[in-house]
Image: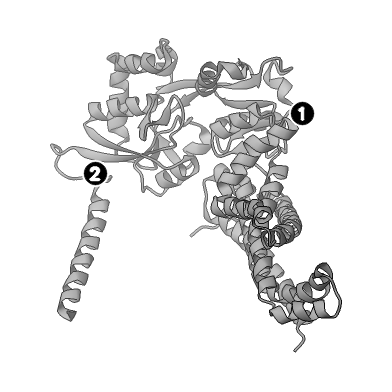
Amino acid sequence: MKKLSGLVMAMVFVFVLAACGAEKTTGDGQGGSDTEKKSVRVVTDANYAPFEYMDGGKIVGFDVDFVNAVAKEAGYDVKIENVGWDPLFLEVKNKSADMGMSAITINDERKQTYDFSVPYFLSTNKILVPEGSDIKSAEDLKGKTVSVQNATTGQSSAEKLLGKNSKDIKKFKNNNLAILELTKGGADAVVADNTVIEEYAKNNPKQKLVVIEDSKAFEAEFYGLMLPKGSNVKADFDEATKKIIDNGKYTEIYKKWFKVEPDLDKLKEQQ
Amino acid sequence: MDFRFDIIAEYAPFLLEGTLLTIGLSLAGIVIGTVLGLLIGLGKMMQNKWLAFPFECYITIFRGTPLLVQILLIHFAVVPLFTGNTNGILASIITLSLNAAAYIAEIFRAGILSIDRGQMEGARSLGMNHVQSMRYIILPQAFKRMIPPLGNEFIVLIKESSLASIVAAPEIMYWGQAMNGQYFRVWEPYLTAAVIYLILTLSLSFLLHRLERRLATE
């Protein structure tokens, strides 16, 4: 009996060790023979339709199709995992993930901590308000309650107008909660990336929401794949991104999700 | 490990405000929850099964579902139904009170049931009616026994008030997450929040310990 339990213990021990070993090798894109497909662990916050969201337990969206196309071009296997917005930044920083993909805007503040791929998407912040609201431009947001997703460029845009950590800004875990707050009357406006709020307004016509553009107050932004500093997959992914933009694959994915032509010139200008 | 005290200093005023709100939310939850809990506990103990049934349902629902679910439901569905718009602080107070009431009701019930039946019989034979016997004989004795489990519940309540951050009630965790979101750092915001919560719960258990000693008769 004693012998048997000792054996079981030994086996468990070996299994655990094997599991640890296996974990270390996956996701580590470097080394190995070049013929073998390298695997990257991509983390996301699948709460951001149409970029990434859950559809029947699967993560789908523009970003998902895009990163799969790029990885295929570059010869990588991708494993996408939904971890949430704030944890995503930590995972990439700690290098427990190879890449963050979640409609992440490239900005100077983030560049201090992370590397980014070449820009792959052009976006601006816009304002979502109920029909008949007296908010007509970004300037009108002053003195109003604005709900945003914590740690997004929507938040920084709102903070530029209302002041940093202003009491009139409500920060939520994701845009769905922020928009819910607006539709239930707890906020006067939502500031977020145009695609997300346009998609929401389009899909929920009964809620009578209007999207307001203010290109003077909110500058164009570019999304990039977020990488840890000194990432060894950056070169491969940058090259593949440029390639699929040139060969029309990017346009195809873009049109599948947004039903319009992408502004490739502006995007290429940034690369 | 580098630990940036400067970002804690930057967020100190917000964390202080957050602490005050956390104390406010917890106090409101404790007071309203205790009053409601006493009523619900007594309700559940009623002889008439039909009258006791709604109270039993209440306890089942609020004790059997996660607080996070309750707070989202109350914030985004229940409160807008009555006031027409959302209010994070109000929703948090309501949820914490209703949730705590379910637990406190059971604590009261346990306390009252723990008193020997002879106490009630003695009180009745002295000519007191049922309410008087409860008020002057049973409840004072039961209350003493309820302090430790009540203290437990109050401490849980302080910690659970952190869930108010999900509906953007600007309490400690809300500012902790804002700090985490701005600097992408973990130790500074969450360790600071943990220390503040620890100070709050330690102060409360100190007060409860004092109360317990004052009420001790032996």
Residue A117 position, x and y percent, is: 38, 31
Q: Quadrant of residue A51?
A: top left
Q: Amino acid at mark 1?
A: Gly
**Residue B162 place in picture, x, y as percent:** 62, 52
Q: Please check whether the numbered discs 2 and 1 fall on a single chain.
A: yes
**Is disc 2 placed on a helix, strand or loop?**
loop
State the residue lying farthest toward the bottom: B218
Q: State which quadrant residue A153 falls in.
A: top right
Q: Image point 82% across, 80% down: which residue?
A: B125
Q: Is residue B22 left or right of residue B62?
A: right
**Colouring scheme, one of rainbow, by chain, secondary structure, one colour:** one colour
Residue A20, by quadrant, is bottom left
Residue A92 position (above or below residue B137): above
The tag on residue A30 is: 2
User: Nearest the camera: B114 or B216?
Assistant: B114
Which chain contains the residue that carries disc 2? A
| Residue A171 percent coordinates (x, y) | 62, 38
* Above or below: residue B206 compared with residue A41: below
Per the image, the residue denoted by label 1 is: A143
SS assignment at label 1? loop
Which badge, 2 or 1, is on the more N-terminal residue?
2
Whether residue B6 is visible? no
Label 1 environment density (alpha carbons within 10 Å; few <14, some 14–19, many ≥20): few
Q: Residue furthest top?
A: A261
Q: CA distance from mark 2 to mark 1?
A: 52 Å
How crowded is the residue under tag 2: few (<14 C-alpha within 10 Å), some, or many (20+)?
Answer: some
When the figure is inspected, residue B114 is found, relative to residue A70, above or below; the finding is below
Residue A94 in sight:
yes
Q: Which of B5 and A102 lies nearest the eye of the viewer?
A: A102
Can you say whether A222 is above or below B164 in the image?
A: above
- Host chain of mark 1: A
